[in-house]
Image: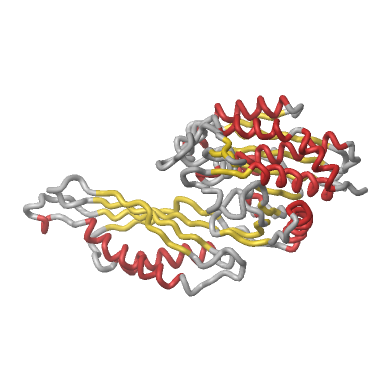
Amino acid sequence: MTISIEKIQDLVAARFDEETQFLAELVKIPSDNPRGDCKAHATRAAELLERLGFTVEWHAVPDNLVKQSGMISATNLVVRHRFGDGPVVALNAHGDVVPPGEGWTQDPYGAAVVDGWMYGRGVAVSKSDFATYAFALDALKRSGLKLKGTVELHLTYDEEVGGEIGPGWLLSQGITKPDLVIAAGFSYAVVEAHNGCLHLEIEVTGKSAHAAIPFTGIDALEATTPILAALYGYRKSLSANISATPGIGSPQLTVGLISGGINTNVVPDRVTMRLDRRMIPEDNPQNVEDELRRVIAEAATAHPHAKVNVRRVLLARPLTPTPASKRLSEVIRKHATAVFGESIEAKGVPLYADARLYAEKGIPTVMYGAGPKSLEEANGHRADEKLKLSDLQKATEVIALTLADLLD
């Protein structure tokens, strides 16, 4: 069986105005995380999907897990369409987004279209792929093709806080068991690998005292200083380790949060820091954590009277390519090259995403979806996030062609 690019293009074009409006409706509903109250967005997304004729499953995450993730509400939506006996291909995109921040020239919830670009928070990362995936599946339903297999849409709401109660929960509960996964992307390239991430919290505990007699206390901030210096020294060594995967670069370390102290005239009794260590695909997460704990412990010996406790907050393992995921990547690249009229490459990205959660279960997984040529061009996670609507249409064609190929 073969299907022409022209046939898919006609099917997608027939409903592209509807697809554009579908995306606009999703952009207009805030789903910032934090705060993490995404129920209204899930409700609207389900309504729009049902208008397309899909049956939408609601999978509400238990409240205790939601609160542990720092969110207010989380409901995962699953759509399944069975064409026949064959593999299950899952398409995952997340509807939660980072807060807008300052500096916008457009309403971050306005979905304004200017010169062919739609503006709004989440329009590129990754509400766009709610539309890409839904309308690619819709085009296949209308195609009349005799396909073999099932397509699932996994629309989740916790990517910005780690993904554990989104894809991670769907997988752990046995709600889904896909054979292949395409997760939300944000550039022309097919992403085969991404960094992992380790967050550690370092708590330094001393003893408070009046600032007039500081020697009667144990200064937690003073004890923190050599730890900070050691971490920054360690950071300098990371630049020498460069990943073999294009687009990844070297590991990174950032101390992103510091809090502590009681008042200006009191010796601080407690200082807490959180660090972010980005891991390249070649890194072993356990070795990375052990190394950081060793750096911290050695630096802490400079002030033995202060207590230092290190706690893991988050561990996101890197996404690493496998022979099976590379075969999936090749299928997408073939169709993307034909649709875009230019060579579409595979690469890695120096962030982490929900794709890793599927890969950790041994499922071949790559990232691909609507977006400009780079995350920077899309203003992802920045003011004036935007998406070229012609790219949305092309990405929808690519996904539809890929699914037809995989289910042939």
Q: Is residue 289 above or below residue 29?
A: below
**Image x and y of residue 222, in percent:** 22, 60
In the image, 199 versus 280, the foreground residue is 280
Query: Colour mode?
Result: secondary structure
Which residue corresponds to the image point at 65% horizontal and 31% vertical from the top-left?
22
Q: In this view, does 12 lie above or below 274?
A: above
Which residue corresponds to the image point at 22% horizontal and 48% vertical from the top-left?
261
**Image x and y of residue 329, in percent:** 73, 57
In the image, 265 versus 352, the foreground residue is 352
Image-based side of 62 in relation to 297, left or right? right
Tell which residue pokes out farthest to the right in this image: 1
Whether residue 92 can be seen here: yes
**Image x and y of residue 352, in percent:** 55, 54
**Image x and y of residue 215, in percent:** 11, 59
Which residue corresponds to the image point at 65% horizontal and 38% vertical from the top-left?
130
Whether residue 356 can be seen here: no
Tell which residue pokes out farthest to the left in this image: 212
In the image, 211 versus 189, the foreground residue is 189
Image-based side of 80 in relation to 215, left or right? right
Tally of marks: 0
* Quarter of the figure with residue 8: top right
Tell which residue pokes out farthest to the bottom in this image: 240
